[in-house]
Amino acid sequence: MNFTEVYKAIVEWQLTQFGTAEQRGPVGPLRHLVKEANEAIDSFGSGSNELGKREVVDCLFLTLEASWRSGMTLPELIELLWTKLRENRARSWPAVTADQPVEHVREAGN
């Protein structure tokens, strides 16, 4: 199974379970994403790697749901992923310090 097939199956299930983009926008899934991300952090922090992995997948489900509910198509999502990767590659990044967030170096005005 490739990514396109699993993406379509996820969207079909989300449509059936949670309604259309007209019935529910991207904000609900993004709010839920915060909860799931915290659950993943807690799972990995407690040493439960397998549970943490499942929580990361929940985060991906919610991210995909927010993307299509915002009107983004799969080709647009893929294009934006490549665009964002190019932007990130062009940025400066500080040294990694353990399990703390690592954000790009911000230039004046960014």
Image (tube, rainbow, N blue to C red):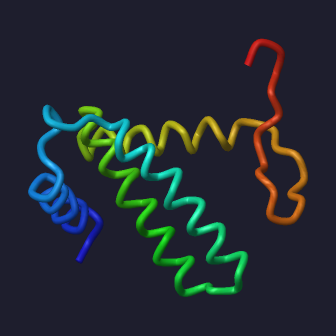
Residue at the image position 43 percent from the left and 69 percent from the top = 57
Q: Identify the residue at image location x=37%, y=36%.
A: 27
Left or right, 67 with respect to 56, comes to: left
Q: Which x, y percent locates residue 44? A: 66, 77
Residue 78's place in the image compared with 42, above or below, is above
* Residue 67 figure quarter: top left
Q: Quadrant of the N terminus?
A: bottom left
Relative image position of residue 107 (x, y in whole percent): 82, 21
| Place of residue 101 in the rendered image (x, y in percent of width and height, measured from the top left) | 77, 51
From the top left corner, tell me how far across and down residue 91 is, in percent: 74, 36
Left or right of residue 55: residue 28: left
- Quadrant of the image occupied by residue 86: top right
The part of the image, by quadrant, that contains residue 71 is top left
Closest to the observer, 90 or 64: 64
Image quadrant for the C terminus?
A: top right
* Residue drawn at point x = 81 percent, y = 38 percent: 92
Instruction: Depth check: give the residue in front, 64 or 80.
Output: 64
At 26% from the left and 35% from the top, the residue drawn is 25
